Amino acid sequence: MSVLDELKTLSSAEEFFEKLGVSYEPEVLQVLRLHILRRMGQYLVSEDFSGMEDAQIFEAAKVNLEKAYQDFIESNPMAERVFKVLKEHDPNRPKAAPKPAFVQIGTLNTNTDPT
C-alpha cells in the first residue's frame, strides 16, 4: 500500500501526526484539528507526486503537515480562513447585493389588460 493510500485510511488528526512522526501539543490539536488537516489537504493537492518514491511522498506529507500545524500556531483560524463559512464572514469581503424585499401577493396588480 502506498503512503497516500495509507493516509486515506487514517481517521483522526492524532493518527496523521503519529503516522508521519510530527510532534504536536494535544491542547492545540484538540482545538485546531480540522483547520490543520484541511490546510494539509490544500498543500497536498498542490503537490505533484507522480514519479516520486514512497519515501519522498512520506517526507512531503510530513513537511506539509508540519507547515499546516505551524500556520495555525503562528496565526489563527479567522486569519487563515480555510473553511468556506469563515471566508464568507470576512469583514474585508465585498458585500453581496441586497435581496429584493418580500412583496405580499395581495398587493400585486393582477390586471393584465394593457388599456
Image: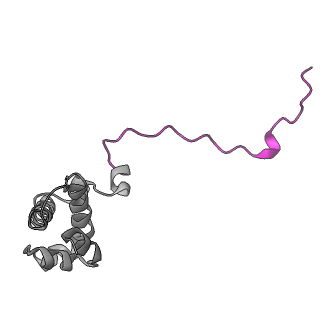
Q: Residue at x 11, y 66 (%)?
A: 62
113 or 48: which is nearer to us? 48
List the single residue furthest toward the top. Answer: 115
Which quadrant of the figure has residue 114?
A: top right
The stretch drawn in magenta includes residue 105: yes
On-image quarter of the N terminus: bottom left
6 vs 66, left or right, is right
Q: Position of residue 34 (x, y in %)?
A: 27, 68
Residue numbers of the magenta segment: 89-115
38 lies above or below 17: above
Magenta: predominant secondary structure element? loop
Position of residue 3 measured from the top left corner of the image (x, y, whole percent)? 19, 71
The quarter in which the C terminus is drawn is top right
> Residue shown at 20%/79% (left/top)?
15
The color scheme shown is: one colour
Please identify the quarter of the rendering in which residue 101 is found.
top right
Q: Residue at x 19, y 56 (%)?
A: 49
Question: Who's the residue at 80% across and 38% down the image?
Answer: 108
Q: Is residue 96 above or below residue 4?
A: above
Q: Is residue 60 magenta?
A: no
Residue 90 left/right relative to 63: right
